[in-house]
Amino acid sequence: MQSNTSAKQFLLNCPSEFTHCDPTIEMTRVAPHVSQFAVLPTAEVEETQCVDELITLFNQTFKALNTRLVRGAGEPIYLPADAQAHYHRIEFAHGFFNSALHEVAHWCIAGEQRRQQVDYGYWYCPDGRNDEQQQAFEQVEVKPQAIEWAFSTSAGRFFRVSTDNLAGVEPDRTAFAHKVSNALQHYLQHGFPSRAHQFIDALHTHYQTTPLTLELCLLHSKDFN
């Protein structure tokens, strides 16, 4: 499922269990004029390490479900086990940490039958949506993004909603952010889906973060700060 793959900065906050990433550094892309032989910025190297650690954490947590988180080279997609791989694959976009959390959130909502189909059997309407299409897109994105927000907070990272329609009608980001916030509040009060709850616990333990509250989630939101 689609996520916000255009974000250019990520707050780094990796656990000390594997390697030590500086949580105060923000990663920025290398400027176009920098030589291709230049050493990558420390923050970019650390972000790659953080993604590797996230993949390991997910794969260890859900080993019994024969599902692996995979760094993709292109757009995100879910692939059930087939002749090419004996395990289910959650491929996230371009190696981005936030994309990984978003795709895991979709997986946590998908039922057993959905998880036997490519991309859970859904058709994705690409960027360039009209108003009606954008409303439909946002409707199915509310719950996954609420869960992604919980994941981000549990990993000590900032979260921003994704309306993901740069070439189409301009979305009402504020209204959508409030819908996602309402869904998050519902989950906090009534419980998350079982796999989402399991991954939140894994993230919380791994990153040694504070238990989730609405106040803490709001502090990690770039839409409400």
Image (spheres, rainbow, N blue to C red):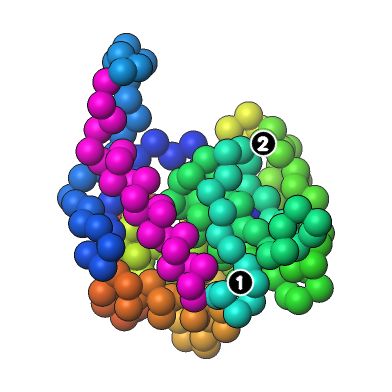
The answer to whether residue 83 is visible is yes
Residue 181 appearing in the image: no
Q: Which callout, 2 or 1, points at the residue further toward the start of the chain?
A: 1
Residue 32: x %, y % from top left: 36, 16
Residue 4 position, x and y percent, is 52, 45
> Which amino acid is tagged 1?
Cys
| Residue 46 lies in the magenta stretch | yes
What segment carries the magenta color? 38-61
Q: 182 or 12: which is nearer to us?
A: 12
Is 201 or 89 nearer to us in this picture? 89
Give the residue displayed 32% in from the left and 78% down from the top. Answer: 205
- Please say if 130 is above or below 199: above
**Residue named by callout 1:** 108
Left or right: residue 167 versus residue 183 is: right
Using residue 150 as the reference point, say whether residue 94 is left or right of it: right
Crowding at label 1, few (<14), some or many (≥20) Cα neighbours within 10 Å?
many
Q: Say which residue label 2 marks.
A: 127
Q: Position of residue 207 (x, y in %)?
A: 29, 69
Mark 2 residue crowding within 10 angstroms, few (<14) / some (14–19) / many (20+): some
Q: Amino acid at mark 2?
A: Asp
Q: Is residue 51 above or below residue 200?
A: above
Q: CA distance from mark 2 to mark 1?
A: 24 Å
| Residue 43 falls in image quadrant | top left
Image quadrant in which you'd find residue 129? top right
Secondary structure under badge 2?
A: loop
Residue 53 is one of the magenta-drawn residues? yes
